[in-house]
Image (cartoon, coloured by chain):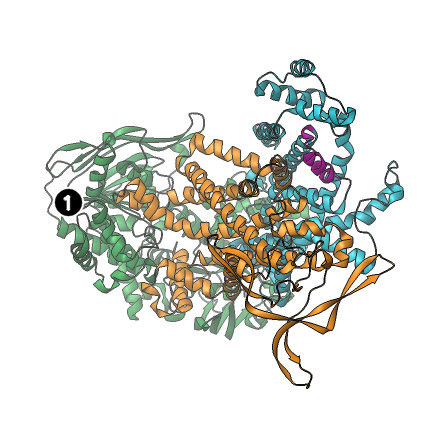
Chain colours: A orange, B green, C cyan
Amino acid sequence: MSEQIQNQEGEVSALVSTYGHDVETLGHWRLMWMKFLRQKLAVASGIVIILLYMVALFADFLAPFDPQKAVPKLTYAPPQSIHFFVEDENGESHFQLHVNAYKVTIDKAALRRVFTIDEDKIIPLKLFVEGADYKLFGFIPSNIHLIGPANPNDPFFLLGADRIGRDGFSRVLHGTRVSMSIGLIGVAVALFLGMLLGGLSGYYGGVTDMVIQRAIEVLSSIPTIPLWMGLAAAIPLTWSPLHVYFIITLIVSLLGWTSLAREVRGRFMALKTDAFVTSAILDGSSELRVIFRHMMPSLTSHIIATLTLAIPAMIIAETSLSFLGIGLKPPVVSWGVLLQDSQNVRAVAQAPWLLAWPGGAIVLAVLAFNFLGDGLRDAADPYSH
Amino acid sequence: MSDQQTNPVISIKNLSVDFALRRGPFRAVSDVSFDLYPGKTLCLVGESGSGKTVTGRALMQIISKPGVIVEGSISLVKPDGATVDIAQLDPRGKEIREFRGGDIAMIFQEPMSSMSPVHTIGSQIIEAILQHSKMSKAEARTRTIELLASVDISEPELAIDRYPFEYSGGMLQRAMIAMALSAEPRILIADEPTTALDVTTQAEILDLVKRLQVEHGMAVLLITHDMGIVAEVADEVVVMRHGKIVEHRSVDDMFHDPQHAYTKQLLASTMKLEAGAANAAKAVDDKAKPILSVRNLSKFYGTEKNGVQAVDDVSFDLLPGKTLGIVGESGSGKTTLGRLILRIVEPTTGAVSYRDRDGQDVDVIGLNKKRLRDFHADVRLIFQDPYASLNPRMTVREIIGDPLLVNGRLRGEALKDKVTELLDLVGLEPEVMERYPHAFSGGQRQRIGIARALSLEPRVIIADEATSALDVSIRSQILDLLLDLQKRLNLSFVFISHDISVVRYFCDDVLVMHYGKLVESGTAEQICTDPQQAYTKSLISAVPNPDPRNKRMMHRTRFDVTAN
Amino acid sequence: MLRYIIRRILYMIPTMIGISFLTFMIIQLPPGDFLTTMLAYIADSTQGGITEALEQKMRVQYGLDKPLIVQYWKWISGIVFRGDFGPSFGWGVPVSQLIGDTMGLTLMVSLCSLIFVWGVSLPIGIYSAVNRYSATDHLFTLIGFLGLAIPNFLLALALMVFGYSVLGVRVGGLFSPEFMHVDWSWDKFVDLLGHIWIPVIVIGTSGTAALIRIMRANLADELEKPYVVTARAKGLPEWKILFKYPVRIAMNPFVSTIGWILPSLISGVTITAIVLNLPTSGPILIQALIAQDMYLAGSFIFLLSILTLFGMLISDILLALLDPRIRFN
């Protein structure tokens, strides 16, 4: 007993030394925030994630082209890089954003066109250039793009072009929108189901608990990919992309809610017998107040962490299904749909950017969510170190 | 052992231990020196954070990770007279392992977690034997059975193949002792070996250690926070505080002629509890009707085939203004009893009747949710663990004010004023109001808990081991606070505790519980000085007496469960 | 112990029933029933239709006019009592003829992956826990995070592209062409070993990363436990303290991870097999799903789930062997 006290006394002083001497009047959320800020990797990941969602929001503006715009004569055109200065005839260099144009040669042996960068010919670029029409956030009509060729019909492929000459850069940006939002919406569904069923299970116990637990057990013992495949394959081909999108989100969140429900249930059960909850009941708090004022705040931080860690699994799920051709389908653009083009190894060998950029985007997003989730999980318990 | 034998087996000189923390080195043990003699017991006493455990572990160089011995020597005298300085040995080296568990052995506070849960008791002891001798496995097994028998474990042939979780704490501590003795050590370090155990088990373990010490002529270093144990078993005493030795005396001098102010204070807190009868002056009308009346209360857990009768047909009355102590060892059902009264746990059978402010008797068991809330406002609970019972996400003001708020009694400025008043009542400054529980020590948190209990102006307080988690000096402060509050606010207490001396100090009447049953009841003085039942006798006599001239534990009454 | 195993097996039955319901639901999910699908196949192959009267007659013959629960019973009793998984329309043979070989290979790849995952993550996890915050630990942590972040199919694709464009070999398959359709022999087995390591690495990477983290965290906790101090106080050498006590106890949660690592491995096998074109259940499953050959697809989903359940059973038995607290309950 005294040993335990000793540790806890030690923790109080350790807390003071970790967070500074003002710690007495700092609330739980402040302590968590301070602990979170000390984890540089998690903070950096948080910023990356915010940026990714900004990209998703402003994809129309950031992308130079409509993601469906195809330039058939420029199939598999390699990535260009942006240059800042041009030399005029006098040998003086002045500022002009540009990319180099392509030279086309025919590879007679392979019977295909080969694009190389033409150093002599430039394609001038403009910032805030007028291009394809779009509606920002779905309702503000505009045709301004952050960057694009001064002549909208000039080729401008920062990340290369695909099989039918669509701009890889614009497509990856637009894919961000679908892939990142599926994680978010999926997690919202999982949160709802998990809190509801996990809470019911943990609060009532008994038969309710048993039934829910067995259902969770059944769901989690079916290997996820075959299960998703089975469910996704049943989506009628005639459904609209939006419809498919929501169904896929639902299917993907099937995975998330079970683990969340388990977490909520476990914590609820543990909290129910915690002394401070008993004391709140004895203080005269109503059942609702006990749950929302005393139990929920203790759960929230853990739930946020669990949710953050559930998002990457959903992103991977969507990408996997779409990659297999039974998730989202063209013309919808998601990272997984983009990767469908990489199923042909020969094509990828010729145009590695088809695999590299959407794949890189997935890895970046998943890594960032994992780091962030880990950081949040650590911060959720600010009294340990 | 004769007194002529004056050569120490180990001598510690100017020992200092640093812990490398993020904010810089922290000196846990500073300039500590003492010697251990064969057949003698030295007690290392101190409150939490005094560095006593680190000192004990330093003797074997098994201090936990960031700690290192930075100064001093630990000279172990080998049987042939040569000495080795353990402090100079590589803590991961081969040499030091010869002494660990060989010349020096150690037993720990928590026998349950100090043994591996997935290995049999036998395998853990046999391993220790094989490490320090050239025996074959079969011989080591035979030797283990002998050792288990020597520590009074029944059926040692079967016990050897049992797992730790199949045993009680006391039995496991015996097994730990058997393990420690396996290589016939000359020095035994016992780190709070009985703190986790019940008082009767504690007495048995201390008996056993003493007997084995005499048999083997070991030097014993006993680390404890309990002055009673010191008085019962020590020859010499070292008092530590903040990593330093404040006093080093023979046990008799320590208790009857303490020099250092801290020692005096430590003894005073201990002795005060022993004096008892703090309530003698209390004038209570014995003819008054009971404020709380419990009749035939029972709680049964589990199924008919496989169940536990946690509380078995308990009846008692609590008179207004009185303090009723409920004592018992672990598993006696005392905590459950407290929870049954408040209906945190619903009783299986029985009745609880509460006499409310208007003199009406209220049937507590039959109350609906709303009426039960009113009952909870009058009858409050103070929790054992001051860390777990305060919501870490609320400020002190919110914690103390919450009962008033949810009962719709006060809000806004008036609530704040009330909280200030309550803080003042429990001896805390109003400035602490905006702080969170993590900013307080154990004693302060318990004060906050008390203020919360008082906020609704209750009439009865059920205190469940309210002082058990606190150091002895803090403990007596909290008890005095409660006594003071009782007088000022005319409170009645149900005081649940395993600690006889606290009960004696604090309570008017005492109930003794054993395996869910009420064994004996009477006034505190009568129970403590003239118990009638065999169980009570054994319980009372097992309590260490903090006076080395009057050792109680060593000639105590023993209670045989099977005889009951 | 025997009682524990029996209880554990009995406990599995309701879960199996639940899985069979879910699978049957998946089979029923696509619009129309299996007769519609069958008729579509017949129409495809014979260029002609079938009269409505005949269709109605067949509907009664197959029991499709009965309530769903009767149809379910017909399906599940066929599997349980006769090993009859229903017909595959795409292949024109009973499903049971199609699953034997592929399920065997699926099991084989999963098992190899499991061994790989454990074999790699155990030593690294122990090393990382003991040398926490060392440079090597940080390196393993970084690799682990990458392993978690790269989806199976992406890794498989990357390996294939790497093999094709850098090494100039075709990565994929489990057998060289000459062994593809011959009976089992020693040479075929050796040939299998030469191929199987690529899918095993692809499938195992994320599991390995997860298990390293679990082992590291558990062992780090166990290293702080009092029984470690006890062991040290006995004078045991450090390696023995480590392996006999904390590692042994940290093994328990490690073994119990099989409960979720196995489903994820089988998931991994499925998708990796599709990318790498392995003759396991994955490619057949996806073909069946795309063609809505639902009895075939459902049978695979059902069997893969049952396989997972048995894996969990084995892990629980292992755990009980390891941890007497469970055995004695």
Which amino acid type is marked by label 1?
Answer: Gly
| Quadrant in which residue C328 is drawn | top right
Q: Which residue is mark 1?
A: B321
Q: Is residue C51 visible?
A: yes
Give the total of numbered labels.
Answer: 1
Quadrant into which the C terminus of chain B falls = top left
Compare residues A216 and B192 and report the one nearer the observer. Answer: A216
Compare residues A99 and C163 and report the one nearer the observer. Answer: A99
Compare residues B439 and B347 and report the one nearer the observer. Answer: B439
Q: Secondary structure at mark 1?
A: loop
Left or right: where does residue A52 sit relative to residue A330?
left
| Quadrant in which residue B76 is drawn | bottom right
Vertical arrangement, residue B409 with respect to residue B13, above or below = above
Disc 1 crowd, CA 10 A, few/some/many (<14, 14-19, 20+) = many
| Quadrant in which residue C220 is drawn | bottom right
What residue is rendered at 70% in x and 51% in y? Answer: A341
Left or right: where does residue A357 sit relative to residue B285?
right
Q: Does residue C289 show up magenta in the picture?
A: yes
Predominant secondary structure in magenta?
A: helix
| Residue B149 position in % (x across, y down) | 54, 44
The span shown in magenta is C279-295
Vertical arrangement, residue B341 with respect to residue B276, above or below = above
Q: Is residue B125 visible?
A: no
